[in-house]
Amino acid sequence: MGLQQKIIKGEFLRNTVTLVTGTAIAQLFGILLYPVLSRLFTASDFGLLSTISQISAIIMVLASGKYESSILIADTKMEAANIIGMTLLRSSIILLILYAAIQPFGKALSVVLHEPALNKWLFVCPISAFVIIIYNCFNEWCVRNKYYTVLSLNKIINTLAHTLSKTILGFLKVVGGGLVIGDLIGRTISAGSCVYKALNNDKNIFLNINKRRFSSLSKKYIDFPKYNMPDQLLSSIGEALPVFLLGAFFNNTEVGYYSMTLAVLSVPVSIISAAVRDVFRQRANEDYLNFGNCSGIFKKLLLILSVFSFVFSLSVFFILPKLFAFFLGRSWMIAGEYSQILLFMIAFSFIANSLSGVLIVVNKLKVSLYWQFYYVGITLLSILVGAILFKSVKATLFCFAIGRSTAYILYIFLSYKYSKGEKRVVPNL
């Protein structure tokens, strides 16, 4: 048992380092190009991209039914491949239906959200949603099969494709929709890379996908569209609410400042936390199957993440406005001020997201769904309080940061509670 634990420990650390290293390299390329993008495009351009991205995220969840989340726990590799095929077929059909349903309301959405160009670019949403689903399926496939080197490489390709396509279009003076087009091109290249690598590594398996199994698999994993899809749909709505409400109560320029704040701080943090979560979920799943709980790895990772995130937050808090002005240009200093307000909320989100695989591993999808109701509710309430009572963007963001932080703290507590499982044997890291 001692030798087994040493092997597991070494493998976990090695896999974590592999993914985090690849993610860090990917983010380095992205961060280096942010000063260029911030000078090529305006805050309004970033506001448009943010709105398009949030709509895409919402319809993506509806289309996939979150069946891709079942890839990790599928009984066999062949079954997992069939789940991918079923998810992609289902998604393509539903996205066409969803686009036909929302397209007539494009002008109304543009008016409500103070985003005049939204109607023109609404067609991008279903395309972007589909290529994201492809990427997510490949991500789950790599996690299941421990293809961490491949997954790490694809994160680099994903970031490079996004940032370089936006930068090239910026230099070509494709303003307004340049960021939207660049983002779509980047996502398409990333999805294409996923398909190539999947076929290259497991071509024989994917060529033997059987459509006749799709119906039985959709019934077998029906809990994912029943519980995990509403859960993730609420999560996507919660992420979209600040963008939509800031646009509705203020203007798309403020949405641009907010989105740049997230791009510089929250997006890199969320990508790193996703890398940690991918390895954590696989290890937590193994521990839960072998020992009946995953509290050992949870507690140790929680301590490491907490120390790292709050030490880093304290070290950059006072210099953020100057950093934004220096790297992005003086016109973006206000985004640096917004980042100070949101910084510790982002720290809590980093911890919660890194450990967010527990409720799926222990099959507590209902608990996660109930938490999402609180997440969306407190987000909506806090923004409305700030916007209606104080009529100030900064006050609104401050109320939002406090409300959202309580949601992340609650999620961490719930994850810890259910990581204990039913048995008393606690595995060592």
Image: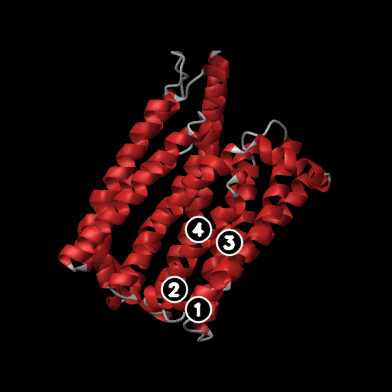
C-alpha separation, residue under disc 3 versus residue under disc 2: 19 Å
Instruction: Tell me whether circle 3 and circle 2 mark residues in contact (CB < 8 Å).
Output: no
Tell me the quarter of the picture where residue 161 sits. Answer: bottom right
Against 360, residue 157 (above or below) is below
- Residue annotated with mark 3: 129
Q: Which mark is residue 21?
A: none
Amino acid found under the numbered disc labelled 4: Ile
Image location (x, y in percent) of residue 346? 33, 51
C-alpha separation, residue under disc 2 versus residue under disc 4: 15 Å
Amino acid found under the numbered disc labelled 2: Leu
Q: Earlier in the sequence, mark 2 or mark 4?
A: 4
- Residue annotated with mark 2: 109
Q: Earlier in the sequence, mark 1 or mark 4?
A: 4
Q: Which mark is residue 119?
A: 1
Residue 36 in view: no
Question: Residue at position x 53%, y 77% from top?
Answer: 121
Instruction: Tell me whether circle 2 and circle 1 mark residues in contact (CB < 8 Å).
Output: yes
- Residue annotated with mark 4: 58
Against 195, residue 374 (above or below) is above
Q: Residues within 10 Å of mark 2 (few under 14, many from 20)?
A: some
